[in-house]
Image: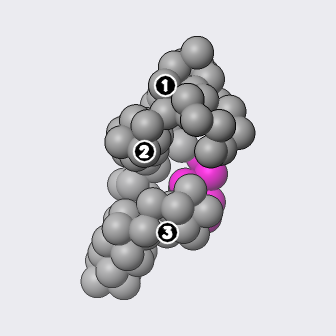
């Protein structure tokens, strides 16, 4: 896991608090596009699955370098705020 950068919450209580990390994502490396599905990032899940298929798994090694920043942007777009 990368370095913990803080906790986010949804102002209307729609979801529990979530820890955010920066840097390399080990869970994304091990689980690939399933990691995006678990985080409910459906577009990135589809993109990752398609690229993994066409690059014969090479993209599976690239996505973990920016997966945490994608997750942060995803949560901010859904209305989450830093504590």
Is 4 colored magenta in this rendering?
A: no
Q: Is the magenta stretch mostly helix, strand or loop?
A: helix
Tag 1 residue = 81
Alpha-carbon neighbours of circle 1 within 10 Å: few (<14), some, or many (≥20)?
A: some
Is 31 colored magenta in this rendering?
A: yes
Kind of element beneath mark 1: strand
Kind of element beneath mark 2: loop
In the rendered structure, are the residues bearing label 3 and label 1 in contact, judged by CB atoms less than 8 Å apart?
Answer: no
Please identify the quarter of the rendering in which residue 48 is found: bottom left
The x, y position of residue 56, in whole percent, is 37, 81
Give 26 or 83, whichever is nearer the viewer. 83
Determine the CA span between mark 1 and mark 2.
Answer: 9 Å
| Vertical placement of residue 55 versus 33, above or below | below
Alpha-carbon neighbours of circle 3 within 10 Å: few (<14), some, or many (≥20)?
A: many
> Which comes sooner in the sequence, label 3 or label 2?
3
Tag 2 residue = 78
Task: Look at the image and tell me whether residue 51 can be seen.
Answer: yes
Determine the CA span between mark 3 and mark 1.
Answer: 25 Å
Task: Look at the image and tell me whether residue 58 can be seen.
Answer: no
Which region shows up in magenta? 26-32
Q: Residue 33 carries which label?
A: 3
> Which comes sooner in the sequence, label 3 or label 1?
3
What residue is drawn where x is 49% and y is 33%? Answer: 80
What residue is drawn where x is 33% and y is 80%? Answer: 50
| Vertical placement of residue 47 versus 12, above or below | below
């Amino acid at each position: 896991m990368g370095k913990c950068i803080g906790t986010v919450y949804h102002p209307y209580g729609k979801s529990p608090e979530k820890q955010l990390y920066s840097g390399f994502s080990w869970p994304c490396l091990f689980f690939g596009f399933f990691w995006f599905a678990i985080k409910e990032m459906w577009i990135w899940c589809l993109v990752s699955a398609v690229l993994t298929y066409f690059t014969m798994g090479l993209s599976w090694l690239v996505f973990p370098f920016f997966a945490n920043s994608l997750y942060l942007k995803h949560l901010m777009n859904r209305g989450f705020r830093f504590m």
